[in-house]
Image (cartoon, rainbow, N blue to C red):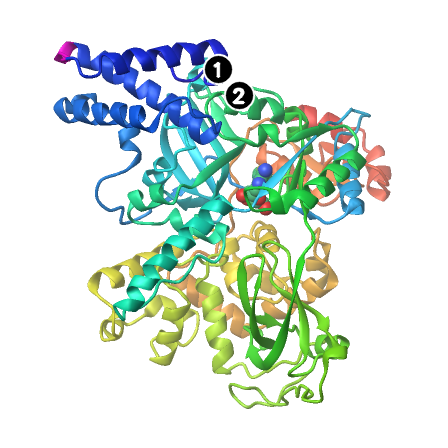
């Protein structure tokens, strides 16, 4: 008996009568031969009732009978341990503690979403989508809530849940399979094989119902009464559903996870393959069908919340409708997600390195609260920038307590007319960092004091400067200890070298104890000194050593980010990492060469030119190299050899892809990019506004002039 056709009425009837027949014979003596079938049937009906109850909010069995079945299953499994299977409902709660959550790679990266806030943004999205599809193709949009929880990726292999992971950095996350199994809305078994899928990664959000959050807090309050009576430390209340859900996924005890009654809503098929290992992610052709099938296989999905539209104006109306009812919905949602329904169109539209271009998040409006500005602290960033930080009377905003907010710079304070002791308006939209909208001058009572910006660095007392055209005051002392620390914290951080076991606290301690003095010293740490520090044992030292060692083999873009060059984030770093054989080669580049790179403006080019023109920086890079850190180009693995031996040059602008994207495609398929027209050139890909290069190429008969579509066919 399979347990997949949960939504099929006939099959419901069959399962209900199977339940009755099992209950009838439950106390009969069961022989060893009979137990296998009996056990299988009990598992099937329990999984069915779990799905009815937790996913469909439908109770078809009394608690009493459910418990009898569950107890019987446990008893049989204890008597005949070989009958225990990973998808048995008894396996939802692991025995013993779950001590570590190893890092695992996602089958394909989990991306972010681009945000939109109003109809203009949505219209822009609509225009971009249609432009990418070139022809006057009809587009269907599907809009569904944006659940504010903790993302999760579940892998089913041969119909069984084999792995669950958190999003992590999008490429790799923490493996939390045992805890995911404790979530009743995650099926342990789902009949994907019925569709010829042998391996699949589905994605969604782990959530805590708001009523459950309140209940957990009520329980904690009761526990606290007891703790108070015993003069013991009280427990903190859970601040909001999202953090509680995220925290729960990392609990060591999965019975504790089960007690929190989390939910999982699945909204995407990340990857699917058939038994031959062929990618069939697009098998159901539309997002709507994906949801329908997932729902049918026992997952909780936004199938009933979603709606399909052909006009972006109607999408907006639907988003507004949800915005008004968000407070009465049983989960926290911070917006809506709008997706192109057709998976084929999604693939045509493509993605950036950060988000798919076929989807957008419509963020609900921020919520506001009033508070009082108590103090302003001045913090020094990695680049010496001084940032004023407002310390306010703690306020709750959308479930999060806020007491500290950046005021950006001096001009911001002046513009917003903010004074100490002022009443200020604080705003927060979902994930967005809280923000001070302004002060409320009508509430002033004379106790307000002007905010004095410092003239010297709060760390090293060096005089501050304000570079031309900037609104930020900076400390330009390169030996300023505060900057060094921030610089090193950035270097080891996740977005840069991602050195496992080397967090902010460690950097601060190591700097304070003179164990590290600059970036290169990270690779020559004297571990005897570390051993003498409090709290460091052989195991943690080994972990740190391993983390540092592993970082030597990072792809080049991580080092580029880690160097902390102004204006250089990970996207630009990835672009740069492919442009030279080794990083120090940039020392010969002119500012113009940097400017010629696509997406690099004059400010960024200047910053790169200044950085790589500095002998000391080149020295740092070369020292890192002698210490074993990778400074070599990121090699792209070939997608095909279809263009092998052929040379290309792109000119003008193209309907579907950027020039840089096309250049990458050329290299990925074995071709070579040339920078000028010559007799060595095989193909000129000419777009709109192609100028002198086209004219020149037309004069050389051996050069084939093609358009983007022809090029795309060549690599199909
Ligand atoms: S689709 C990147 N659908 O929002 C495209 N995401 O800000 C795949 N999220 O990391 C995601 N509700 O964790 C999608 N209905 C929904 C969603 C949703 C919440 C989360 C998801 C993602 C984040 C991006």
> Horizontally, is 601 left or right of 644 in the view?
right
Instruction: List x then y, in percent, for residue 463.
Output: 61, 90
> Horizontally, is 299 left or right of 443 in the view?
left
> In percent of the image, x 45 and y 27: which residue is there?
200
Q: Secondary structure at mark 1?
A: helix
> In percent of the image, x 25 and y 74: which residue is there?
534
Between the residue at mark 1 and the residue at mark 2, the CA separation in whole angstroms equals: 10 Å
Mark 2 surroundings: few (<14), some (14-19) or many (≥20) residues within 10 A: some
> In percent of the image, x 39 and y 56: which residue is there?
551
> In percent of the image, x 36 and y 69: which residue is there?
506
Q: Secondary structure at mark 2?
A: helix
On the image, which quarter does residue 422 sit in?
bottom right
Residue assigned mark 1: 195
Asked if disc 1 and disc 2 are in contact, CB closer than 8 Å, the reply is: yes
Instruction: List x then y, in percent, for residue 352.
Output: 64, 43
Q: Is residue 558 magenta?
A: no
Residues in magenta, as a range:
29-33
Relative to 266, does residue 215 appear above or below in the rendering? below
Ligand 1 within 8 angstroms of badge 1 C-beta: no
Residue assigned mark 2: 293
Ligand 1 within 8 angstroms of badge 2 C-beta: no
592, 496: nearer the viewer: 496
Instruction: List x then y, in percent, for residue 687.
Output: 81, 36
Dominant secondary structure, magenta: loop
């Amino acid at each position: 008996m399979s347990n997949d056709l949960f939504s099929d009425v006939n099959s419901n009837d069959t399962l209900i009568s199977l339940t009755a027949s099992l209950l009838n014979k439950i106390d009969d003596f069961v022989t060893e031969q009979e137990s296998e079938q009996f056990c299988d049937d009990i598992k099937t009906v329990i999984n069915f009732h779990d799905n009815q109850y937790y996913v469909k909010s439908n109770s078809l069995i009394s608690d009493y009978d459910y418990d009898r079945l569950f107890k019987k299953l446990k008893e049989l499994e204890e008597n005949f341990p070989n009958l225990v299977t990973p998808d048995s409902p008894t396996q939802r709660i692991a025995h013993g503690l779950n001590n570590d959550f190893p890092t695992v790679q996602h089958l394909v990266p989990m991306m972010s979403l681009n945000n939109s806030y109003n109809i203009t943004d949505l219209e822009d999205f609509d225009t971009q989508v249609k432009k990418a599809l070139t022809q006057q193709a009809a587009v269907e949009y599907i809009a569904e809530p944006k659940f504010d929880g903790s993302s999760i990726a579940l892998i089913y292999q041969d119909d069984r849940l084999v792995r669950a992971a958190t999003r992590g950095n999008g490429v790799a996350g923490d493996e939390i399979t045992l805890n995911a199994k404790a979530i009743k809305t995650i099926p342990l078994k789902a009949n994907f094989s019925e569709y010829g899928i042998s391996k699949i990664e589905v994605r969604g959000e782990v959530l805590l119902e708001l009523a459950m959050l309140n209940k957990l807090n009520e329980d904690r309050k009761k526990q606290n009464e007891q703790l108070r009576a015993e003069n013991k430390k009280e427990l903190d209340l859970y601040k909001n559903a999202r953090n509680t859900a995220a925290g729960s996924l990392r609990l060591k005890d999965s019975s504790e996870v089960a007690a929190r009654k989390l939910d999982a809503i699945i909204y995407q098929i990340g990857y699917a393959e058939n038994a031959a290992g062929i990618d069939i992610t697009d098998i159901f052709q539309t997002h709507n069908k994906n949801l329908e099938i997932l729902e049918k296989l026992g997952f909780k999905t936004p199938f009933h919340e979603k709606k399909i539209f052909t006009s972006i104006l109607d999408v907006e109306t639907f988003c507004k409708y949800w915005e008004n009812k968000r407070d009465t919905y049983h989960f926290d949602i911070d917006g809506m997600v709008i997706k192109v329904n057709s998976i084929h169109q999604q693939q045509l539209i493509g993605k950036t390195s950060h988000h798919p271009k076929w989807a957008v998040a419509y963020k609900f409006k921020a919520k506001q609260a009033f508070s009082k500005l108590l103090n302003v602290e001045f913090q020094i960033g990695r680049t010496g920038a001084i940032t004023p930080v407002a310390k306010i009377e703690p306020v709750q905003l959308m479930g999060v307590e806020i007491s500290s907010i950046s005021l950006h710079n001096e001009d911001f304070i002046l513009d917003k007319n903010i004074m100490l002791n002022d009443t200020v308006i604080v705003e927060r939209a979902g994930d967005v960092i809280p923000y001070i909208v302004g002060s409320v001058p009508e509430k002033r009572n004379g106790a307000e004091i002007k905010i004095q910006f410092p003239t010297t660095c709060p760390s090293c007392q060096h005089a501050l400067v304000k570079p031309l055209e900037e609104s930020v005051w900076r400390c330009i002392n390169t030996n300023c200890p505060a900057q060094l620390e921030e610089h090193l914290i950035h270097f080891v951080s996740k977005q840069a070298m991602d050195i496992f076991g080397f967090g902010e606290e460690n950097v601060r301690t190591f700097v304070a104890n003179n164990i590290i003095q600059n970036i290169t010293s990270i690779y020559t740490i004297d571990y005897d000194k570390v051993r003498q520090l409090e709290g460091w044992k052989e195991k943690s030292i080994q972990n740190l050593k391993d983390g540092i060692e592993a970082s030597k083999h990072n792809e080049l873009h991580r080092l580029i980010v880690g160097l902390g060059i102004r204006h250089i984030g990970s996207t630009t770093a990835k672009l740069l990492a492919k442009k030279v054989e080794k990083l120090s080669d940039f020392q010969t580049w002119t500012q113009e060469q940097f400017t010629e790179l696509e997406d690099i403006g004059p400010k960024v080019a200047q910053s790169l030119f200044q950085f790589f023109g500095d002998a000391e920086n080149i020295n740092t890079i070369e020292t890192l190299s002698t210490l074993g850190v990778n400074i070599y180009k990121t090699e792209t693995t070939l997608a095909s050899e279809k263009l092998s031996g052929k040379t290309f040059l792109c000119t003008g602008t193209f309907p579907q892809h950027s020039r840089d994207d096309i250049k990458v495609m050329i290299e990925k398929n074995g071709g070579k990019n040339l920078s000028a027209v010559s007799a060595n050139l095989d193909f000129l890909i000419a777009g709109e506004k192609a100028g002198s290069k086209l004219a020149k190429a037309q004069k050389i008969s051996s050069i084939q002039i093609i358009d983007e579509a022809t090029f795309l066919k060549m690599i199909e």
